[in-house]
Amino acid sequence: MKVNNILIIFTAIIVLTTICQGEFTSLANNYSENIGFEQVSDSIISVRQPAEFEQMEAVLIRYPFGIPYDLIAEMSEDVEVITIVDTVANQNDILDEFENNDVDLDNCSFMIAPSNSYWTRDYGPWFVFSEAEMELKVVDFEYNRPRIHDNNIPNIFSDHQGLNYTYMDLIQTGGNYMTDGNGIAISTDLVIEENPGKTLEDIEQIMQQHLGITTYHLPSDVNGEYIKHIDCWAKYLSPDTILIREVPQTHPQYQEIEAAVDYFEMQTSCFNTTYTIVRVYTPNNEPYTNSLILNDKVLVPLKGTQWDDEAIDTYEQAMPGYEIIGFTAIDEPLSPVKGR
């Protein structure tokens, strides 16, 4: 099956782990100086990158899994689940496990390829629609971890799906990226740190050329000296709505988080309106922002604490018409490389 629009979800999934919890160190973020923001209005954009909240046909996960089978079963009800496996023998074993855990086998397929980790959202392919060729293309980037097999997955995937492939000369990671599907994108300034040989203008030009991004917000990370991924504290729910974590005033990152809220409240959405900012309470660094919007469902990581119900209610209030489903997070050990 050729995937017309695929959303990458990483296994052991930040969506469902404690990965957005960690030892946070307070940093003083000056948002007026550290935001990378420029509107590019004179260029003709020939590609469009779809947003997570658009219609999807598949998810890409990797075995061994770090997400529960009930989540995989839930996803298989609606979309194709493509699983990366090392061998055919692993594929056969997984099919037995899928069947035993009510995963819809009719919606399962496999891609045999070596891999290093289960963070498919971080290293998996990005996609654009090309206006000129009227086709879906894979856009690859240099994965910001020293994992050669993971870094090769987008190229292998493009061959597997029969999609054209383009390489973007930029160090990136999917966990530190989100887009509204209309030419606006957000990452933390980790992108600047990890591309020291490029100016901000170089980065913006690459993003515009390969992804059709004309406005690229690069705020300082609000979570201190952690992995600096945007999905640990913010999420596009729609083109004009952004979910941002909320913490009590006693939290070490309170000032940084509120500064980010102030910044985005002053920005303009693709509809030429100010953003609606939705807050989700994360007093103990719960990973509620790291959900997955999968067509008419939102899959939310829960921690089994008193704040889970409030987080579900926040999503229900912000996204009427969606089915909000919580899944208990799996506790995974942090990787040696800053969390994952």
Image: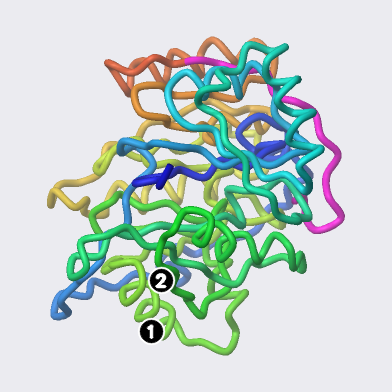
Disc 2 residue type? Gly
Residue at image point 67% right, 48% down: 119
Residue at image point 78% right, 55% down: 116
**Image quadrant occupied by the N terminus:** top left
Number of the label disc, if any, that sits on residue 201: 1
In the displayed structure image, the side of residue 197 where residue 184 appears, left or right:
left
SS for tag 2?
loop
Residue 137 drawn at (x, y percent): 37, 62
Taking depth in this image into account, of 1 and 20 the one nearest to the observer is 1
Residue 254 in view: no
Q: What stretch is highlighted in magenta?
A: 325-340
Residue 154 drawn at (x, y percent): 56, 61
Taking depth in this image into account, of 114 and 72 the one nearest to the observer is 114
Number of the label disc, if any, that sits on residue 36: 2
In the displayed structure image, the side of residue 224 where residue 241 appears, left or right:
left
SS for tag 1?
helix
